[in-house]
């Protein structure tokens, strides 16, 4: 029997413009996704039959209700696989934090089982399966930096110049994505720039300019619906200076930095603040594949 241990990365959104509402109820996006060096670890152990999902995190659904289960089920059904798999998720990525942890886990199971069972499924085919699981899952089939369109299923991978450094602050607040989209008023939210300016800065390597261009249509909704999140945002703004942004539908707030040294210095400032330490987890990360 075979087994695999794989990293399943978190993402942040450097740019997220909701372009409009679609007839299917989803929203049309123009977004820049970036995987970062914060990982869950997924262990896949082949077995004779059936699927099981277990995790070390008490707040995470196990079994059928976990997206990782759906990923394994899709692969088995679509490719007529008889073997089963035990999936264990070692959770480091906060849940409901706008970091795409569940979607990443599902994509990791798709790519992992493709390797484990030597199925030879192409990335574009895996990406189609991924879209059946959730809007953010196709991006994680590629990882790295990507321009993402449609409801999330159209992924254009981008080459960036060098690793960028980010400070992530994840409040202990789980924000349901659906609630944020339901409360979005499109006419109130329009970006001053478009994604192409940020893509240019990512390729030329200018973090100060990227900082100015960070944008998220969902930020105001999340801060409006969760006053305790807004209070943390304002406290961070006073402490850190520089531009902050909510990732995805929240609750994680991040800041781009010039160097790993600057990220560590700012993380130190937050950890010295007892109120923030109680309310949040702090991660120092860089862009990752
Ligand atoms: O696709 P997923 O199940 O991850 O999406 C969760 C919810 O987020 C959807 O039910 C929908 O309300 C909202 N959503 C959206 N437009 C997107 C992605 C998600 O409206 N592009």
Image: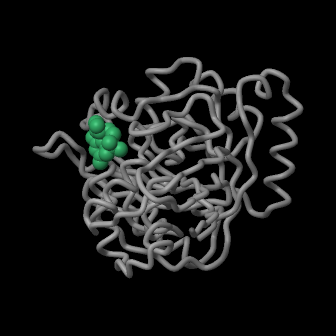
Quadrant into which the N terminus falls = bottom right
Residue 33 visible in rendering: no
Q: Quadrant of ligand 1?
A: top left
Check the image and report above or below for 192 versus 111.
above
Task: Quadrant for residue 282, please give it.
Answer: top right
- The residue that appears at 27% across and 67% down in the rendered structure is 80
Task: Quadrant for residue 137, please give it.
Answer: bottom left
Residue 67 drawn at (x, y percent): 41, 46
Residue 249 drawn at (x, y percent): 44, 38
Check the image and report above or below for 204 versus 144.
below
Residue 188 visible in rendering: yes
Total numbered badges shown on the rendered structure: 0
Would residue 61 appear left or right of 128 to someone viewing this image? right
Quadrant into which the C terminus falls = bottom right
Task: Quadrant for residue 82, please give it.
Answer: bottom left
Residue 189 drawn at (x, y percent): 33, 39
Residue occupying the far top of the picture: 227
* Display colour scheme: one colour
- The residue that appears at 40% across and 36% down in the rendered structure is 65
Residue occupying the far left of the picture: 23
Check the image and report above or below for 44 versus 17.
below
Q: Which residue occupies the foreground of this view, 50 or 93? A: 50
Would residue 236 appear left or right of 272 to someone viewing this image? left
Residue 276 drawn at (x, y percent): 76, 26
- The residue that appears at 40% across and 69% down in the rendered structure is 196
- The residue that appears at 27% across and 65% down in the rendered structure is 128
Q: Which residue occupies the foreground of this view, 175 or 118? A: 118
Would residue 11 appear left or right of 288 to someone viewing this image? left
């Amino acid at each position: 029997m075979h087994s695999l241990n794989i990293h399943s990365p978190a993402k942040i959104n450097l740019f997220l413009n909701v372009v409009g509402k679609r007839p299917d109820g989803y929203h049309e996006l123009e977004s820049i996704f970036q995987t970062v060096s914060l990982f869950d670890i997924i262990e896949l152990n082949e077995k004779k039959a059936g699927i099981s999902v277990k995790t070390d995190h008490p707040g995470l659904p196990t079994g059928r209700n976990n997206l990782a289960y759906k990923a394994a089920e899709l692969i088995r059904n679509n490719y007529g696989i008889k073997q089963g798999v035990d999936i264990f998720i070692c959770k480091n990525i906060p849940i409901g934090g706008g970091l795409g942890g569940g979607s990443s886990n599902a994509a990791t199971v798709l790519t992992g089982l493709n390797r484990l069972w030597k199925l030879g499924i192409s990335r574009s085919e895996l990406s189609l399966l991924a879209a059946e699981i959730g809007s953010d899952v196709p991006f994680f089939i590629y990882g790295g930096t990507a321009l993402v369109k449609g409801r999330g299923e159209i992924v254009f991978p981008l080459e960036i110049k060098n690793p960028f450094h980010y400070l992530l602050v994840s409040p202990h607040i789980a924000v349901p994505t659906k609630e944020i989209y339901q409360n979005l008023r499109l006419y109130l939210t329009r970006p001053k720039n478009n994604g192409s300016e940020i893509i240019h800065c990512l390729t030329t390597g200018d973090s100060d300019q990227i900082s100015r261009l960070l944008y998220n249509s969902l930020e105001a909704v999340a801060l409006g619906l969760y006053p305790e999140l807004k209070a943390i945002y304002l406290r961070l703004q006073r402490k850190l200076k520089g531009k902050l942004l909510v990732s995805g539908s929240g609750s994680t707030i991040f800041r781009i930095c010039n160097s790993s040294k600057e990220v560590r210095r700012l993380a130190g400032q937050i950890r010295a603040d007892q109120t923030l330490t109680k309310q949040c987890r702090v991660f120092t990360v860089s862009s990752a594949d």
